[in-house]
Image: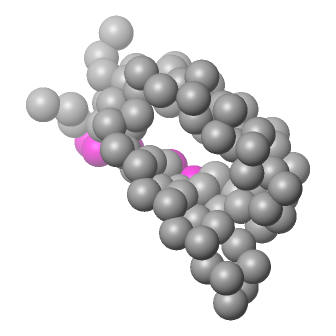
């Protein structure tokens, strides 16, 4: 299966959801190349960007699990081709 490189953007709108988000990310740690998290206190949200490298199915499983967490928004951008 072809591996894909991409970025997953996560916005946590209720900080009580952060523990569940971190649990999901830990479960999919093998896909994660890098992570940056920024608490945006003025807006009361946290924003996390994840660099991922995995099959389309693996990345979809990760984003699907994240998307089912209440008060969490997820968007993904994948490179056209992995090198």
Is 72 rendered above or below residue 5? below
Residue 74 appears left or right of 80: right
Instruction: Specify whether residue 28 is painted magenta.
Output: no
Name the residue at the left extreme. 83
Q: Which of the 4 image quadrants contains residue 46? A: bottom right
The residue at the far top in this view is 1
Q: Which residues are magenta?
A: 75-80
Quadrant housing the N terminus? top left
Quarter of the rendering occupied by the C terminus: top left
Q: Position of residue 30 (x, y in %)?
A: 42, 21
Residue 9 is situated, as x and y percent measured from the top left of the image, at 52, 56
Residue at 58% across, 34% down: 25
Q: Is residue 36 above or below residue 55?
A: below
Q: Is residue 60 visible?
A: no
From the viewer's side, name the closer residue of 31 and 54: 31
* Residue at x 22% of width, y 35% of height: 81
Q: Is residue 32 above or below residue 56?
A: below
Residue 41 image-quadrant placement: bottom right
Nearer to us in this view, 61 or 23: 23
The answer to whether residue 11 is seen in the rendering is yes
Task: Identify the residue at horizontal 60%, vertical 72% (top origin).
Answer: 39
Where is residue 57 shown, x and y percent of the image?
A: 52, 20
Q: Position of residue 15 (x, y in %)?
A: 79, 62
**Total numbered circles:** 0
């Amino acid at each position: 299966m072809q591996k894909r490189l991409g970025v997953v953007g996560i916005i946590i709108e209720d900080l009580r959801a952060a523990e569940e988000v971190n649990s999901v990310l830990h479960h999919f740690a093998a896909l994660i190349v890098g992570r940056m998290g920024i608490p945006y206190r003025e807006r009361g949200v946290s924003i996390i960007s994840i660099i991922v490298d995995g099959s389309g199915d693996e990345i979809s499983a990760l984003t699907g699990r994240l998307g089912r967490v209440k008060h969490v928004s997820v968007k993904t951008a994948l490179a056209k081709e992995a090198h």
